Image: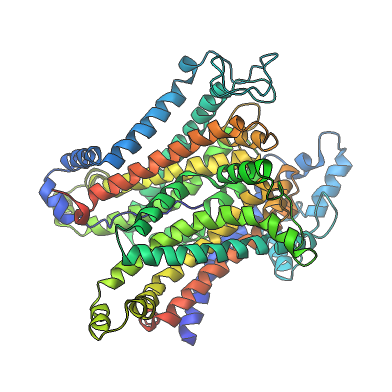
C-alpha cells in the first residue's frame, strides 16, 4: 500500500500576502486545522497515541517481555485489557511498547531523512547546474524503488536491528523531501525578497535557511505527516515479515506476525492492529487537514 | 515518436546503473568481512577462503561489479547458498504465483476502482462519493497484513469458505486455485481500488467541467454516452500514471501478502532468503524487481507520448 503524497503546489502567494508574516501563516494553518472536524480527529488520534506510546511505563504495570505463569493466550480481562499471548505476556503493555518502538524509529528516521532531503533539495534548487542534476538523478533512482523494497534491500545488507531499521526508513524518506525542497526553492528563489536579501549581502546559507526555508515550510509539514505514516507502515511491515527489530522486544508488526499462527485468539491481532490503523488514520486525516488549510481554493474565510 | 522513445530509453540508463549498483552493494555492505560472516562461526580459514573466492570477494570492486552485472545481463544470477540451485531457477518458479496474484488483484482493482471513481466524479456528494471517501480512509489506515489477517480470521478460520493460506496451481485445479487466490487478491485489489478510484474521480470531475462536455450534452447525447465517450476517455490520460504506480504498488504489496497467506512467490523468496542470509538469491530477486519497476515506469512514459502528442515535443 502506498501513501500518496498529494501536496499543494508551493505557489500559495495570495495566502502568504494575506498572512503578512510567516509565523502567522503557520498560526493560521493551525487554526484552520482546528476548525476542521477531520483535522481535530486526526490531531486527537495522533497526539493520544503518541502520548500513550511514550507514557507506556506509566500506563501499564506489566513488563512487555515478562512471562506471567498460568495466563497463556487469555482473552481481554480486567487484569489484561488486551489479553495475553502464547508466551503468557501482557498484550496491552506489548502493544504500548510496540507502538513506542515504532514511533521512536519513525520519528528519528523521518526527522533525519527529511532534514537531509530538504537540505539537498534546497541546495539543488539554489545552485542549479551539474550539482542539481546529480542530486535529482539520484533522487529519481531512489523513487524508482518502492519504500518497502528499498528498506528490505537495506536490511538485507545490514541485518536486523533498531538502528538499521531507522537508517532504512530515513533513506526512504529522503527523496520525497528532496523533491519538495527543490520545488520550494525554485518557487521561492525567484521572489523579490530573495533578491533583496542578496543585495543586502546575505550569504547563500543565510538566504536558504533564514529566508526561503521559512516560506517553503508548510508543504513540507504535510509531507512530514505523510512520511511518518509511510515510515510507520514500512516499519510495521518489516516487523511483520520478521526482518525488522529483533525479538523479544515488541514492535507492532512482529506482534501481529505472532498472531498469524494463533487465529483462534482474535484478540491477539485485533488490538495491535487497531492501534496501528488508528495511528495511520490520524496521520492521514491530519495531513489532509493541513493540506486543505494551505490550499487557497479550499479555504473557508 | 521514435525519437521520443529513444530519449525515454536513454533517460532510464542512469537509473538502471544506479539501481544495479545499489543491489550489487548489498553484499559489500554486510558488516565486517562478508566471507567470514557467511561462513559461520565454526568455519576454518580455508573455508572462508573458499567462500571468498567463490564470491569473487578477493577481486577489485569494479571488476566484481562488472562481472556480476555482465553475468546478470546474460541471465546468470549466481547460485543459491541454501539450495545450491541457480538463482534464476528459483526466481522462475516464483514469478508465476506472484504474477497470478498481481494480475487478479489488478483486475479486481480496475473492476472496482474505475466505475466507482467515475460515478463519484460525475455525481459529487452522492452515495458513490461518500462510499469512496470511506474506502479511501480505510485503505490508507489499514495495512495489508492487518486486513489480510482480519479476512483470514472471518472468512477462512470462522466461516471456512477459503483455505487458511497456501496456493494451488490454477491449471491443475482451477476451483481450488481460485479459492486460494480470492482473499489475497481482495486485500491487494481493494486497497488499490480506493487509490485508483480517487484519481479517476478527480480526473473525471475536472473533465466534466470542460466545454466539450457541455457541447456533447447540448447536442442531445444521452448522459451515458457523455460519460463514457467524452469524459472517461479524456480522464484516462491521467489514469495511466496511476495505473503504473498501482502496478508497482501491487507488486510490493504482494511481497507482504504472500507472507500473510503463506503463498509461494517472489515475496516469500526474498524474505526467506534474507532470513537465511542467502545473498545471491536476495540480490537476484531484488534486481529482477527493480528491473520490473523501471520497465513499468518506462512503459508509462512511452504511453504518455502515444496518448498525448504534445508530450512528445517536450
Residue found 60% across the figure and 45% down from its top: B151
Q: Look at the picture and state if B207 lies above or below B283.
A: below
Q: What percent of the width, then of the height, locates residue A16?
A: 16, 50
Indicate how the structure is coloured in the image: rainbow
Residue found 12% across the figure and 51% down from its top: A17
Q: Look at the picture and state if B66 lies above or below A225.
A: below
Question: Of residues B81 and A190, which is closer to you in this image?
Answer: B81
Q: Look at the picture and state if B67 lies above or below B269.
A: below
Residue A30 placement, left or right of B132 = left
Residue found 21% across the figure and 42% down from its top: A32
Residue B106 visible within the image: yes
Residue A46 figure quarter: top left
Q: What percent of the width, then of the height, locates residue A185?
A: 28, 55
Q: How many marks?
A: 0
Residue A137 placement, left or right of B19 = left
Q: What percent of the width, then of the height, locates residue B15?
A: 53, 65
Q: Quadrant of the C terminus of chain B?
A: bottom left
Q: What percent of the width, then of the height, locates residue A53?
A: 46, 26
Residue A49 figure quarter: top left
Residue found 27% across the figure and 44% down from its top: A209
Residue A245 visible within the image: no
Residue A287 placement, left or right of B6 = left
Amino acid at each position: 500500500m502506498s501513501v500518496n503524497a498529494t501536496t499543494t503546489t508551493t505557489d500559495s502567494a495570495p495566502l502568504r500576502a494575506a498572512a503578512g508574516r510567516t509565523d502567522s501563516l503557520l498560526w493560521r494553518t493551525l487554526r484552520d486545522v482546528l476548525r476542521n472536524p477531520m483535522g481535530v480527529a486526526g490531531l486527537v488520534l495522533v497526539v493520544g497515541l503518541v502520548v500513550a506510546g511514550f507514557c507506556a511505563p506509566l500506563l501499564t504495570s506489566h513488563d512487555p517481555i515478562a512471562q506471567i505463569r498460568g495466563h497463556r493466550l487469555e482473552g481481554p480481562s480486567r487484569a489484561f485489557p488486551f489479553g495475553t499471548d502464547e508466551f503468557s505476556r501482557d498484550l496491552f503493555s506489548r502493544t504500548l511498547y510496540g507502538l513506542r518502538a515504532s514511533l521512536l524509529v519513525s520519528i528519528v528516521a523521518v526527522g533525519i531523512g527529511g532534514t537531509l532531503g530538504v537540505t539537498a533539495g534546497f541546495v539543488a534548487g539554489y545552485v542549479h547546474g551539474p550539482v542539481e542534476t546529480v542530486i535529482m538523478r539520484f533522487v529519481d533512482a531512489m523513487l524508482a524503488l518502492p519504500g518497502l523494497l528499498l528498506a528490505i534491500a537495506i536490511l538485507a545488507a545490514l541485518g536486523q536491528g533498531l538502528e538499521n531499521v531507522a537508517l532504512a526508513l530515513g533513506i526512504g524518506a529522503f527523496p520525497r523531501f528532496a523533491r519538495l525542497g527543490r520545488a520550494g526553492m525554485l518557487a521561492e528563489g525567484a521572489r523579490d525578497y530573495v533578491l533583496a536579501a542578496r543585495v543586502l549581502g546575505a550569504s547563500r546559507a543565510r538566504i536558504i535557511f533564514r529566508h526561503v526555508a521559512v516560506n517553503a515550510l508548510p508543504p513540507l509539514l504535510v509531507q512530514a505527516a505523510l512520511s511518518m505514516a509511510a515510515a510507520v507502515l514500512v516499519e510495521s511491515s518489516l516487523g511483520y515479515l520478521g526482518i525488522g527489530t529483533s525479538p523479544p522486544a515488541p514492535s507492532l508488526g512482529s506482534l501481529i506476525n505472532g498472531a498469524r499462527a494463533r487465529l483462534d485468539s482474535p484478540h491477539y491481532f485485533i488490538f495491535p492492529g487497531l492501534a496501528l490503523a488508528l495511528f495511520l488514520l490520524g496521520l492521514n486525516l491530519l495531513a489532509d487537514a493541513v493540506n486543505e488549510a494551505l490550499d487557497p481554493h479550499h479555504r473557508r474565510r | 515518436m521514435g525519437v521520443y522513445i529513444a530519449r525515454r530509453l536513454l533517460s532510464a540508463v542512469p537509473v538502471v546503473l544506479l539501481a544495479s549498483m545499489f543491489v550489487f552493494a548489498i553484499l559489500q555492505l554486510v558488516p565486517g568481512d562478508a566471507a567470514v560472516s557467511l561462513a559461520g562461526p565454526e568455519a576454518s580459514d580455508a573455508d572462508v577462503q573458499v567462500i571468498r573466492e567463490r564470491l569473487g570477494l578477493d577481486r577489485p570492486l569494479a571488476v566484481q561489479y562488472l562481472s556480476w552485472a555482465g553475468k546478470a545481463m546474460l541471465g546468470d544470477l549466481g547460485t543459491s547458498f541454501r539450495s545450491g540451485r541457480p538463482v534464476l531457477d528459483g526466481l522462475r518458479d516464483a514469478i508465476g504465483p506472484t504474477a497470478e496474484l498481481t494480475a487478479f488483484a489488478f483486475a479486481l482493482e480496475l473492476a472496482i476502482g474505475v466505475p466507482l471513481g467515475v460515478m463519484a466524479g460525475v455525481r459529487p456528494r452522492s452515495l458513490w462519493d461518500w462510499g469512496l471517501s470511506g474506502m479511501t480512509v480505510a485503505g490508507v489506515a489499514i495495512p495489508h497484513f492487518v486486513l489480510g489477517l482480519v479476512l483470514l480470521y472471518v472468512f477462512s478460520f470462522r466461516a471456512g469458505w477459503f483455505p487458511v493460506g497456501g496456493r494451488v496451481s490454477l491449471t491443475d485445479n482451477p476451483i481450488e486455485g481460485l479459492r486460494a487466490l480470492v482473499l489475497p487478491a481482495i486485500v491487494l485489489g481493494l486497497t488499490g481500488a480506493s487509490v485508483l478510484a480517487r484519481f479517476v474521480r478527480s480526473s473525471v470531475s475536472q473533465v466534466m467541467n470542460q466545454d466539450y462536455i457541455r457541447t456533447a450534452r447540448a447536442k442531445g447525447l444521452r448522459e451515458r454516452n457523455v460519460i463514457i465517450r467524452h469524459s472517461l476517455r479524456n480522464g484516462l490520460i491521467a489514469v495511466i500514471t496511476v495505473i503504473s504506480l498501482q502496478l508497482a504498488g501491487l507488486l510490493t504489496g504482494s511481497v507482504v501478502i504472500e507472507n500473510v497467506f503463506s503463498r509461494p512467490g517472489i515475496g516469500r523468496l526474498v524474505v526467506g532468503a534474507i532470513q537465511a542470509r542467502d545473498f545471491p538469491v536476495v540480490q537476484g530477486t531484488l534486481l529482477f524487481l527493480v528491473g520490473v519497476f523501471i520497465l513499468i515506469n518506462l512503459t508509462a512514459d512511452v504511453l504518455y507520448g502515444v496518448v498525448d502528442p504534445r508530450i512528445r515535443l517536450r
